Amino acid sequence: MTARPSHRRGFTLLEVLLTMGIGSVLLFVAVTMLGQAGNGYERGSGSVAAEREARAVLTQMGDDFAKAEWHNETILENGGEGWKRGRLGFLSLQPDDAQSEDGRSGDLCAVHYYIKDIKVGTAT
């Protein structure tokens, strides 16, 4: 009897387990990196949205201030204490395109701004 030469084909169990372990580690690292990139994107887009809102508010306030009219005799709000801190009020000319033909009663409008602390979660 002659022994046939053994030609090994396939992988051993140890090789398969080792390859799966290395692949799992690489997959975990990739998922972690993608999660961090997503968090960075959310932070960046949140600050862009806040900047866009701030720009819109400042533009609106600039338009209001540009059209402001001073009237010494006019009282917009009369509380016992007068104007409270953190408030600003004035009269402004309202643009024609902001008025409807039905409700047009004049082009002068009272603008009143106030500052208020807003609580979001535990932050003010």
Image (spheres, rainbow, N blue to C red):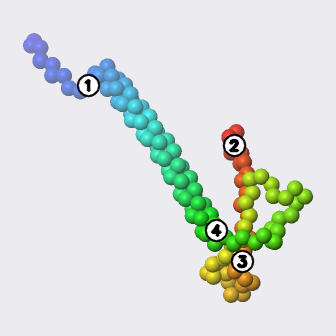
N-terminal of the two: label 2 or label 3?
3
N-terminal of the two: label 2 or label 1?
1
Q: How many other residues sit within 10 Å of disc 3, few (<14), some (14-19) or many (≥20)?
A: some
Q: Amino acid at mark 2?
A: Thr
**Residue for badge 2:** 124
N-terminal of the two: label 4 or label 3?
4
**Residue for badge 3:** 108
| Percent of width and height locating residue 81 | 87, 56
| Percent of width and height locating residue 34 | 42, 40
Answer with the quarter of the image where residue 77 lies.
bottom right
Q: Is residue 105 above or below residue 76?
A: below
Answer with the quarter of the image where residue 94 lies.
bottom right
In the displayed structure image, the side of residue 82 where residue 86 appears, left or right: left
**Residue for badge 4:** 64
Q: How many other residues sit within 10 Å of disc 1, few (<14), some (14-19) or many (≥20)?
A: few
User: Mark on residue 99?
Assistant: none
Answer with the quarter of the image where residue 56 lies.
bottom right
**Residue for badge 1:** 11
